Image (cartoon, grey):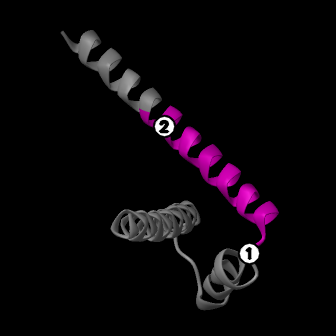
Amino acid sequence: MIAMALLILVLFGGNICQFNRNSQLKDNDLKYRYIKSLNGINSENLYKLENIFHYDRDKKLMKGIRQNVENWEKTIQKTAEKIEHEKIENSKSKK
């Protein structure tokens, strides 16, 4: 009985650690995608970004960053689809 309770506590602790790690990885992914959407970042803005995500977590700003990144990615996707469509049309017209 005690062994079962200890096992449950250890598993529960492992789940908490896993949840925290996944949350950190999601934040890092969003920061990377944000920096990529800006075509780079300077040290001052990087400090501000780290501040938003880690030291003074601001959910409102994080949500805004996520929306900006998703809009940028949609724009890039549409541009890529347009270029691909034009490439297909050009190859058809050459035949």
Residue 66 located within the stretch drawn in magenta: yes
Q: Amino acid at mark 1?
A: Arg
Tag 1–tag 2 contact (CB < 8 Å)? no
Element type where label 1 sits in the image: loop
Residue ID at (55%, 66%): 27
| Range of magenta residues | 58-80
User: Which of the image's four quarters has the N terminus?
Assistant: bottom left
Q: Residues within 10 Å of mark 2 (few under 14, many from 20)?
A: few
Q: Which residue is mark 2?
A: 77
Residue 34 placed where, x, y %? 58, 63
Quadrant hosting residue 8: bottom left
Badge 2 amino acid: Gln
Question: Which residue corresponds to the image point at 46% horizontal and 71% vertical from the top-left?
Answer: 13
CA gap between label 1 and label 2 equals 30 Å
In the rendered image, residue 22, in percent from the top left (x then y), is placed at 47, 63
**Between 13 and 56, the one nearer to me in the picture:** 13
- Farthest residue in the front direction? 1
User: Which of the pair 31/35 is nearer the observer?
Assistant: 31
| Secondary element at image label 2 | helix
Residue under label 1, please give it.
Answer: 57
Q: Quadrant of residue 48?
A: bottom right
Q: Residue at x 59, y 85 (%)?
A: 42
